C-alpha cells in the first residue's frame, strides 16, 4: 500500500468517527459532523480513483455544509418557531444537513463498522423522538411534533439505509464467492487460473 492510500483510509476512519460522535447531539455536534464529512470526502479523493465515489462524498459534504450553515445562521438569529417570530418552515433550510449526514453514513464505500454503528445511532434518534414526545408540554406542542417527526424520520432513514447497505454488501460477497465456477489448475505451470 502506498502512503496516499494509507492517508485515505485514516481520513475516512477519523471522519466517520466524527460523523458518529457528532450525531449524539445533532445540533451541537454539527461542529464535529461538518469537518468529519469533509475528512471523509478528502479521504475519498485521496483513495482509489473512483469518480462516482468522490462525487458522492463531495455532494454529501456540500449538503451537510448547506444545512449546518442554515442551522448556525438561524440559531444566531434566535431560532425558529415559538417566540422567535420565524415560522417553523424556515427549518426546511436545515434538512440538507440531515440528508447529507444519512448519505454519509450508509453511502457507497462506508466501512462495515460504520453501518453497524449507524444502526445504533438510528435507534438513538428513535429514542430521542420518544423522549421529545413524552416531555412535550402544551406551550410548544407544534414545535415538539415537528422536531419529533424529523428526528424519528432521520432515525428510520438511517436504520433502513444501513440495513439495506449491509444486505447488499452480503449479497454481493456471497455471489462473488459462490457464483463463479471453481478454477481449475493450469497443468502446464501449476498456477490456478
Image (tube, helix red, strand yellow):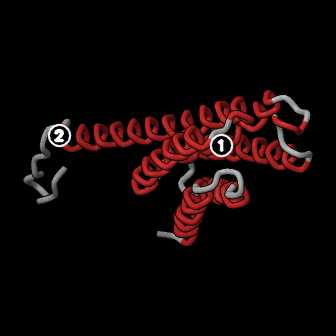
Left or right relative to 31: residue 1:
left
Identify the residue at image location x=46%, y=37%: 161
Q: Which residue is mark 1?
A: 60
View extreme (front): residue = 138
Mark yes or no: residue 46 visible: no
Query: Seen in the image, is 137 located left or right of residue 48?
Result: right
Which residue is nearer to you in this view: 16 or 147? Answer: 147
At horizontal 69% and vertical 33% (from top left) the residue drawn is: 138
Q: Residue at x 62, y 58 (%)?
A: 22
Residue 44 circle label: none
Q: Secondary structure at mark 2?
A: helix
Q: Residue at x 31, y 39 (%)?
A: 172
Which percent across, then down, holds residue 66?
78, 42
- Count of all numbered marks drawn on residues in the image: 2
The image quarter in which residue 145 lies: top right
In front: 141, or 31?
Answer: 141
Tell which circle, 2 or 1, labels the residue nearer the N-terminal end: 1
> In the shown orientation, is residue 73 left or right of residue 190?
right
- Of 131 and 92, nearer the camera is 131
Indicate the position of residue 110 as horizontal and vertical percent values. 48, 50
Bin the neighbour count of mark 1 within 10 Å (Cα to Cα): few under 14, some 14-19, many 20 and up: many
Mark 2 or 1, closer to the camera:
1
Residue that extends furthest to the bottom in the rendered view of this protein: 3
Q: To which quarter of the image does residue 11 belong?
A: bottom right
**Residue on which the image places disc 2:** 178
* 1, above or below 178, in the image: below
SS at mark 1 in the image:
helix
Q: Position of residue 152 (x, y in %)?
A: 54, 36
CA gap between label 2 and label 1 equals: 34 Å
Q: Is residue 2 visible?
A: yes
Question: Percent from the top left, x then y, of residue 80?
Answer: 83, 37
Q: Residues within 10 Å of mark 2 (few under 14, many from 20)?
A: few
Amino acid at each position: 500500500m502506498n502512503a496516499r492510500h494509507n492517508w485515505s483510509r485514516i481520513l475516512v476512519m477519523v471522519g466517520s468517527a466524527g460523523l458518529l460522535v457528532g450525531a449524539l447531539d445533532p445540533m451541537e455536534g454539527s461542529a464535529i459532523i461538518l469537518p468529519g464529512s469533509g475528512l471523509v470526502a478528502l479521504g475519498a479523493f485521496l483513495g482509489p480513483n473512483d469518480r462516482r465515489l468522490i462525487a458522492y462524498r463531495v455532494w454529501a459534504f456540500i449538503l451537510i455544509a448547506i444545512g449546518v450553515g442554515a442551522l448556525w445562521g438561524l440559531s444566531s438569529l434566535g431560532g425558529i418557531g415559538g417566540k422567535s417570530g420565524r415560522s417553523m418552515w424556515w427549518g426546511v433550510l436545515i434538512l440538507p444537513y440531515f440528508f447529507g449526514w444519512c448519505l454519509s453514513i450508509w453511502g457507497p464505500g462506508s466501512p462495515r463498522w460504520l453501518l453497524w454503528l449507524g444502526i445504533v445511532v438510528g435507534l438513538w434518534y428513535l429514542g430521542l423522538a420518544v423522549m421529545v414526545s413524552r416531555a412535550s408540554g402544551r406551550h410548544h406542542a407544534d414545535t415538539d411534533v415537528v422536531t419529533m417527526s424529523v428526528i424519528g424520520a432521520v432515525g428510520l432513514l438511517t436504520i433502513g439505509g444501513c440495513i439495506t447497505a449491509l444486505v447488499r454488501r452480503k449479497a454481493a460477497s456471497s455471489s462473488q464467492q459462490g457464483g463463479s465456477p471453481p478454477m481449475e489448475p493450469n497443468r502446464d505451470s501449476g498456477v490456478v487460473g
